[in-house]
Image: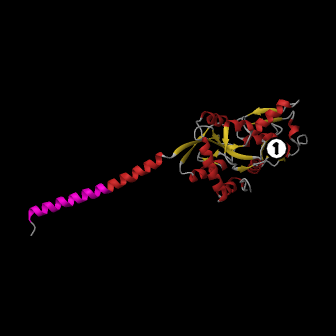
Amino acid sequence: MKLWGEITMNKKMGILGITLAAGFILGGCGTKAASTKSADSNVKTIVVGTSGMPKPFTYADENGKLAGYDIDTVRALDKELKQYKFEFKKTEITSVLAGLDAGRFQIGANNFGYNDERAEKYLYTKPTFQDWFVLVVRNNNQTIKQFADVAGKTTVATPGVNFTMALEKFNKTASTKTKITYSQEDPAKQVQDISSGKYDYALIDKPLFDAYKKEFKLTNLKGLDLSTSDEKKVTPRTPYSYLLVSKTDGGQQLVKDLNKAIVKIQADGTQAKISQKYFGEDYVPGK
């Protein structure tokens, strides 16, 4: 038979054991939480600016969530780069560039092509999309056959993009200027305005035009490929698309990290799947 003192002591020891065990468990949880928090504190938030057009490079889906080739590419890069957390900010295209200028955005994802003016202000990643350009006209148009023929003709264009800058440069030296109407409307609407006869032509990416022609059944339109010399009036380099990176502290390292991840997702087929998803073809650079 146990004496009362023994029973009391055993109970005390039992309670002490439970208390110590609970302490170890809670201590372990606290260590794990602290470790996670410590890891999270080393993750740098990167703000990615995009205008939400042109579709299918960047757009809001039926649920209001950003989607598109550029968006999915950035998300794939985010998965590869554990040291960063990418957050999207949707705004007008001119505000994307202004945000990069001011350092509010660290990345611009908007089907950006290369031009020398931008290269002075921003850092370019490795190319993310193989592009080429066309003049979009109605099938019955017999007056526009090459870039020089846009003189005296009407077009609609988005401010600040390569195509518009090329037309503005053309107007600086042309005796007869092309008539540009500036618009922040979706390029899909701009192409439809060519179809309706509101404007004479549009200068646009061929993959984009092909997607619009199919989606909106624009059977009365055709795309005229630019010659190599005319193509260089739009971009001095091979017509690729890139991500832009702000020239702020950490920009150079961010570009290096992005480039490493771009090589990875292009080599393992991730970006090819994204291209097939949005264009039905493989537009990965170098293919």
- Answer whether residue 218 is visible to the viewer in this image: yes
Residue with the mark numbered 1: 231
Predominant SS along the magenta part: helix
Outermost residue, bottom direction? 1
- Answer whether residue 226 is visible to the viewer in this image: no
Picture residue at 70% right of the left edge, 40% below the top: 186
Part of the protein shown in magenta: 3-24
Quarter of the picture holding the N terminus: bottom left
* 207, 211: nearer the viewer: 207
Query: For residue 8: magenta?
Result: yes
State the image coordinates of residue 280 (x, y, percent, origin top left). Answer: 72, 56
Picture residue at 21% right of the left edge, 57% below the top: 16
Picture residue at 81% right of the left edge, 42% below the top: 232
Query: For residue 174: magenta?
Result: no
Eyeballing the image, is 286 above or below 44?
below
Judge left or right: residue 206 versus residue 65: right
State the image coordinates of residue 33 (x, y, percent, origin top left). Answer: 40, 51
* 284, 209: nearer the viewer: 284
Q: Residues within 10 Å of mark 1 (few under 14, many from 20)?
A: some
Q: How many marks?
A: 1
| Residue 179, image quadrant | top right
Q: Amino acid at mark 1?
A: Glu
Picture residue at 52% right of the left edge, 44% below the top: 44
State the image coordinates of residue 87 (x, y, percent, origin top left). Answer: 56, 44
Quarter of the picture holding the C terminus: bottom right
* 226, 34: nearer the viewer: 34
Q: State the SS at label 1.
A: helix
